Image: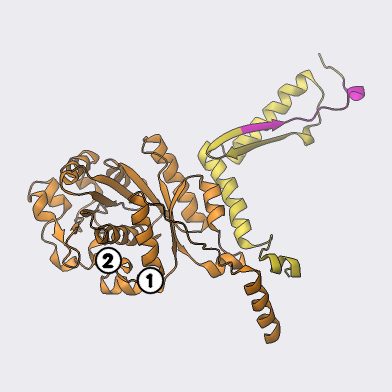
Chain colours: A orange, B yellow
Amino acid sequence: MTGTVVTITSGKGGVGKTTATANIGVSLALQGKKTACLDSDIGLRNLDVILGLENRIVYDLVDVVEGRAKLRQAMIKDKRLPELQLIAAAQTRDKTSVSPKDMVAICDELRKEFDWILIDSPAGIERGFRNAIAPADRVIIITNPDVSAVRDADRIVGLLEAEAKGPGQLVINRIKPELVRRGDMLDTADVLEILAIELIGLVPEDEAVLVSSNRGTPAALLPKSKAGQAFRDIARRLLGEEVPFPSMDGQEGLRGRLARMVRGGART
Amino acid sequence: MTSLLDRLVGRNSASSAQAAKERLKTVLLHDRTDISPGLLQDIKDDLIRIVSQRIEIEPSHVQVRLTQEGREHRLVADIPLPAPSHRRRLS
């Protein structure tokens, strides 16, 4: 088996890298693919709590790098999904505890056992980012439809091109269709025109993401969550399926707009 | 105030999303090319000075800008020439 390493990164913090990693990982596992989620955000680990596996960690990534544990001992099985495993970041160390070379070596071992290895990158463009992209076969860039997240995503695209890691594929996360419709949020076409890279996912804002993170049950496990559906779609696209992108611009057609105007008119 | 037509088409050209898009495009051109607005101005001043040594031009009509097509970028100088009757070669 030769697994594919996908690094999930963004430049900016707080745009949803960890949520995306957890949910894409869950979605791949739901498709029966052996998947490892690797948290490379050393010192600020969170993938464990988002996946609901925080109480099961004995050894972490740095323990493996420093030889205190075998890779297998640091792999935490998800009881809900036998195909999914987590390797946690160390919480009390920093990014320099791991080198890009270490990441490549660990991923080369994981490739033998897994179909997919997802790396949750830290924010920023320094050592942690370099570690996260070193072993990547593919890169997914997460952004939000706002000026700072898009600007940072563009910086990441430039850095990836300089490292010959491709332009990467884009996920636009936390889209609010109602704001897009009002003209107060960049729409999909705007972001794609600006960044000029390939799209792999559109994820609407969804309260279920916060609720599911409270519980440690990723939204991809909830059949009715819109964000969960969007993450499951991303996994299918990773697997090579053609999945159409749903409209995220809140357009409801002429009839809907007329109806809304009539309602609005009646209110005033 | 959006016009009835704009509301029917569901679009507003003065929207904040439009402002975001225009501002992002400009800032990313400078980010990607590492050419700051100040450097662009210096290049423009140099161009005007050098071209003016050879031909007469109107400095206020000169435009120097960065353009983008996909992820490719271009430095474009647009220097209008005066009408032939008014043109005078400097030597």
Which of the 4 image quadrants contains residue B76?
A: top right
Labels 1, 2: front one: 1
Nearer the observer, B14 or A233: A233
Mark 1: which amino acid?
A: Ser
Q: Count neighbours of disc 2 (C-alpha within 10 A) and say few if under 14, some if 14 to 19, many if 20 or more.
A: many
**In the picture, which quadrant includes the C terminus of chain A?**
bottom right
* Looking at the image, residue A72 lies above or below residue B33: below
Residue at horizontal 14%, vertical 46%? Answer: A65
The x and y percentages for residue B70 are 55, 40
Badge 2 is on which residue? A50
On the rendered structure, is A243 left or right of A188? Answer: left
Q: Is residue A225 visible?
A: yes
Task: Inspect the magenta stretch and tell me whether residue B79 lies in it.
Answer: yes
Nearer the observer, A163 or A250: A250
Q: Are marks 1 and 2 on the same chain?
A: yes
Badge 1 is on which residue? A225
Which of the 4 image quadrants contains residue A215?
A: bottom left
Q: Is residue B3 visible?
A: no
